[in-house]
Amino acid sequence: MKKYEVILQDLEKKIFDDIYKENDVLPSENELSKIYNSSRSTVRQALKILEENGVIQRRHGFGSIVIAHDKLLFPISGLTSYKELQTSMGFESETEVVIFGSIDIEAELSELTGFPVGSKALHILRRRKVEGKYSILDRDFFLKDYAIHLTPEDAKNSTYEYLEGKLGLDIAYAQKEITIDFASEEDFDLLDLNPKDRHIVSVKSRVYLADNTLFQYTESRHQVDRFRFTEFARRQKR
């Protein structure tokens, strides 16, 4: 993990643990540099990401102010792994790998994922227990060439930690689609839905490497009444 990522995750955790509360001003860049034994540019990079994610507001000459937050707030913008989100927001969670195996991409799956017909993919289905209830169902398809030697244990822990840390993939951006779908039989079988639940929040993403290669398709299905999905929008003056 890069130094700015260490600083970012530590600051996020302290904010979501209310060590730094809403409207608090974070230590200055110089103070943070001393705390984390790093350069100001590294600290500035971490603060920039916090600002882009809507966690702080930076004001020139005043400092970095903590913005109101919610422990079960799932950001729509950005590309963050589930483990990184759990670590930064501090909620309790367990992951169970339900499906882990190879699959051939046929026409219908090709249209869904964007992968070429005839290619091979790794299919992973995981369910996430959040604070005692299975509330999230994550389905991933990775092009097989980009998930070499990935194991069920890696999937339970963090696929991105393995793909970036051990395989050195440069994961860059995602195209996302958020919809409200009818809950399926699979949703009811694998999630702790309420008997009267009829809908699920679905976040579908095609994920690309820095060279614009599409290597992952993922769909994350969430129980409607357990999460808030938000995007922090900042005015761009023209």
Image (spheres, rainbow, N blue to C red):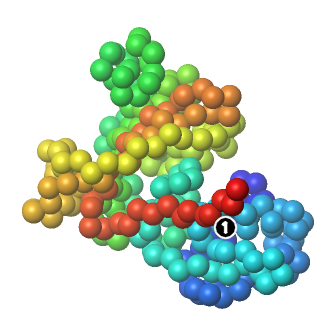
Seen at 67% across and 75% down, the residue is 57
Q: Secondary structure at mark 1?
A: helix
Residue drawn at (36%, 28%), measured in percent from left and top? Answer: 112
From the top left corner, tell me how far across and down residue 86 is, in percent. 50, 64
Q: Quadrant of the image for the N terminus?
A: bottom right
Question: x and y percent of residue 36 in the render?
Answer: 81, 72
Q: Nearer the viewer, residue 147 or 234?
A: 234
Quadrant where the C terminus sits is bottom right
Residue occupied by mark 1: 51
Left or right: 26, with 205 as reference point: right
Q: Is residue 9 left or right of residue 96?
A: right
Residue furthest to the front in view is 238
Q: Is residue 179 above or below residue 163?
A: below
**Location of residue 218 (image quadrant):** top left
- Identify the residue at horizontal 50%, vertical 25% (top origin): 143
Position of residue 69 relative to residue 220, above or below, is below
Say which of 118 and 147 sits in front: 118
Residue 203, image x and y in percent?
38, 48
Task: Give the residue type that dot 1 points to.
Answer: Glu
Q: Say which residue appears at 53% left-offset and 37% top-offset.
A: 207
Number of numbered tags placed on the structure image = 1
* Image: 189 above or below 51: above
Location of residue 169 (image quadrant): top right
Q: Is residue 28 visible?
A: no
**Going by the picture, which residue comes out furthest to the top?**
118
Left of 217 or right of it: where is 195? left
Task: Give x and y (percent) for residue 106.
Answer: 33, 16
Side of 95 relative to 46 (left or right): left
- Which of 10 and 213 lies nearest the eye of the viewer? 213
User: Quick one: label 1, few (<14), some, or many (20+) residues within 10 Å?
Assistant: some
Residue 37 visible in rendering: yes
